[in-house]
Amino acid sequence: MRKIDPERQQSKRQHILDAAIRCFTRNGFHQTRTAEICREANMSPGNLFHYFDSKEALIAAVVVEGPDELSTLLERACSAPDLFVALLEAIDQQLDLLTEPAYTRLALEIIAEAVRNPAVFAAVSAHEARKKAALVHLLQTGVERRHITLSTPAQRAADWILLLLDGAFGRAMVEAAFNLSSYRTLVRSSLTHVIAPATATPAGTSA
């Protein structure tokens, strides 16, 4: 029996996913046909369907494994020497994506598809739950290691951070003159209401 190489399998799967993301970004989910993804990936339909059994499966994979990598960044950040600094770096990387047209187009496509497609909505909800769980874990770990001070429970602090990021995304979508530098400063300033390095006293608390 032929032995399966997991790394090779994962590489091919990622190759297909990257090709699908490019196609979906250009034409949207509904205007993209499987044949186009096959051409983009330079592979036969049979080979593609070995990894993803339908276009819907590819869309769900894009939701979970697409350009929004905040969950992965937060999970990796837990091994950083300073969790407060690691959190700010993860937030900055997320904000940087707002200047990439391909990211914003795909993110809007995912939101629109989630409204009308229950399967995509479920995938988006699961992805958001993972993101929040990773953020809560990072905050709690930061407090335990005395890297971070919170003025509110970790769950609420996580909601605050995600609300700021979602708000920045929304403004980037509707403001023709969206200025990333200004919003980065605004987000950083707003964060001081709930989180600070452990050596400092967060706003709203007493020393």
Image (spheres, helix red, strand yellow):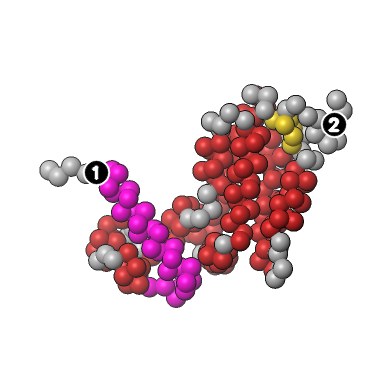
Between marks 2 and 1, how big is the CA–CA gap? 54 Å
Instruction: Choose between 205 and 110: the one closer to the eye.
Output: 205
Q: What is the three-letter code of the residue carrying label 2?
A: Thr
Residue at x 29%, y 61% (from the top left corner):
48
Q: Main secondary structure of the magenta part?
A: helix
Q: Which residues are magenta?
A: 6-33
- Residue 103 vertical position relative to residue 195 in the rendered view, above or below: below
Residue 191 is at least partly visible in this image: yes
Q: Amino acid at mark 1?
A: Asp
Quadrant of the rendered image containing residue 90: top right
Q: How many marks?
A: 2
Q: Secondary structure at mark 2?
A: loop
At mark 1, the secondary structure is loop
Tell me if mark 1 has few (under 14), some (14-19) or many (20+) residues whose alpha carbon lies within 10 angstroms of its own. few
- Mark with earlier residue (2, 1): 1
**Residue 56 seen by the camera:** no
The residue drawn where x is 44% and y is 75% is 31
Q: Quadrant of the C terminus?
A: top right
- Residue 73 sits in quarter: top right
Q: Residues within 10 Å of mark 2 (few under 14, many from 20)?
A: few
Quickly name the residue at label 2: 205
Disc ID at residue 5? 1
The answer to which of 92 and 174 lies nearer the viewer is 92
Where is residue 50? Give x, y as percent.
27, 57
Left/right placement of residue 48 relative to residue 191 reads left
